[in-house]
Amino acid sequence: MLTKYGIDNIIILLFISIVLIVSSVFISKAGISIIFTAIGILLLLFTLWFFRDPERIVPENVLNDKRLVLSPADGKVVEIVEEVENIYLYSDVIRISIFLSPLDVHVNRAPISGMVKYFKYNRGNYIIANHPKASELNEQTHIGMENEFGKIFFKQIVGIVARRLAWDIRIGDILKAGQRFGMMKFGSRMDVALPKNSEIFVKLGDKVIAGKSVIAQFEKD
């Protein structure tokens, strides 16, 4: 199915696709007509692919153990670093950064079961999403969640191609692990900050899936 978070973009892109395909019928030059048709079909296929929102079955162990942390985004793990987080956790953390290519599903899901305790939107700049400074400067949301086992802070970050984030959560909302909460459109990145004593289950280069891949656990044994 297609995501509700991209319905405005879907309508515009589908309209452009139809206009291109229909216009090709009235173009006398065969070469130009074929080009219009090809562009229209490719745009149509891209729209249906990019804004897809597949159903995901959350692992049973995650539903039974609130210490486990799911990936909030599909993509590739591009950074795992220790740093100080001064927005929500105010402590030393381990940050996991996930880069999304245009081929990845861009719908985001809650990494833990718990309450949204912090939310802020920053308009930001236009740096490519896999650049280290994108985590600080680009358009992004800041989201803090908490349950009885720990706190987690994560950011939706978009890149140079588009400045468009979507979300439907607010402070006080209670989410279940794997629950949809928003979308990052086009080149995007998700940063996840965990307490330093968390156990990390992913490494650089790993591919992760939102709502399915367990990336960490609170309170390392």
Image (cartoon, grey):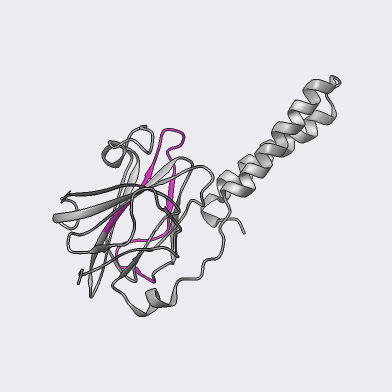
Classify residue 89 as left or right of residue 29: left
- Image location of residue 137, percent across then percent down: 28, 37
The residue depicted at 57 percent of the width and 61 percent of the height is 54
- Image location of residue 9, percent across then percent down: 56, 44
Residue 82 drawn above or below residue 159? below
In front of the other: 71 or 115: 71
In front of the other: 168 or 33: 33
Quarter of the picture containing the C terminus is: bottom left
How many numbered marks are there?
A: 0
Residue 200 drawn above or below residue 126? below
Classify residue 6 as left or right of residue 166: right
Classify residue 49 as left or right of residue 160: right
Magenta region, residue range? 153-176
The residue depicted at 79 percent of the width and 34 percent of the height is 22
Residue 93 drawn above or below residue 122? below
Considering every residue shown, the one lying at the far left of the view is 91
- Image location of residue 152, percent across then percent down: 26, 61
Classify residue 41 as left or right of residue 155: right
